[in-house]
Image (cartoon, rainbow, N blue to C red):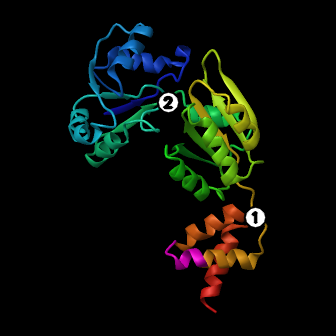
Amino acid sequence: MIILAATPIGNLGDASRRLVEVLENAEVVVAEDTRTTQRLLQALQIANRPRLIALHDHNEKQKAAELAALAADTDVVVMSDAGMPTVSDPGYGLVAEAVAQGVTVTAIPGPSAVLMALAISGLPTDRFTFEGFLPRKPGERRATLTALAAEPRTMVFFESPSRLAATLADMGAAFGEDRRIAVCRELTKLYEEVRRGTAAELAAWAADGVKGEIVVVVEGAPRRAVSADDALAQVQALVADGTRLKEAAAEVAAQTGLSTRDLYQAALAARTR
């Protein structure tokens, strides 16, 4: 069995009792960084010394099949340096291989920088999208943000403190300087801080430099006021480009606030005319 184990993102007190119990009995632990995992075992006062195997971006493709096969006979605990493995961290390739081999995959839930930042941001939480780290190169970052300009869901990003000011400025250019943003810094740690404001305000604040681990939560684009006929035309254009009708209706509905069912039915009716 593969056991994905969420670990503290800063505050050691967030380690669950279940995590401690599993680590006390684990025979094999797959870790993003074995040194970080050794320090965590010591901090949690785990007397058990499991076999530690490194799994990171540079070796996951080579090790996935071997580790999945190992998990068919024994429990393999998978840990990243912080938070849930596979979420912007190594582990997805291993999980995919385990599923392909018919190996059971489960998880020990726990701390998540993504969900914590979303919850305390003050921005809508009913629908959101996690975008991970933006590209490092300015041109690629701007292109990515431009492609997200019409995204109606709240967006969550990870960002390096050294690139935060530039990213916030690019967000202002792509989304509009009045778009609401929350910058969450050092979550669960001693100097935890949340800065809320517009893209322009936060870009000015970050210009002097920011330290720590950063999560950026961005308000989704406002829904556009369009007529039912224009919305139907958008659905039809998406379908013409290869999108399935149901998905096209849902996408346009999310952007306009119109009913997915009504758009779907209108598109079906238009086909029979």
Quadrant housing residue 57: top left
> Who is closer to the viewer here, 42 or 180?
180
- The residue carrying pointer 2 sits among few (fewer than 14), some (14 to 19) or many (20 or more) residues within 10 Å by Cα, namely some
Q: Which residue type does callout 2 highlight? A: Pro
Task: For mark 2, give the secondary structure.
Answer: loop
> Who is closer to the viewer here, 61 or 74?
61
- Drawn side of residue 159 relative to residue 71, left or right: right
Stretch of the chain drawn in magenta: 237-243
Locate the N terminus and report the quarter of the image it occupies: top left
- Drawn side of residue 73 relative to residue 99, left or right: left
Q: Residue furthest bottom?
A: 273
Q: Which residue is mark 2?
A: 109
- Drawn side of residue 209 relative to residue 230, left or right: left
Residue 123 lies, with reference to residue 15, above or below; the image says below
- The circle on residue 224 is 1
Taking the spot 29% from the left edge, 27% from the top edge, the residue there is 54
Task: For mark 1, give the secondary structure.
Answer: loop
Is residue 220 visible in this depiction of the protein?
no
Q: Which residue type does callout 1 highlight? A: Arg
Single out the mark in the foreground, 2 or 1: 1
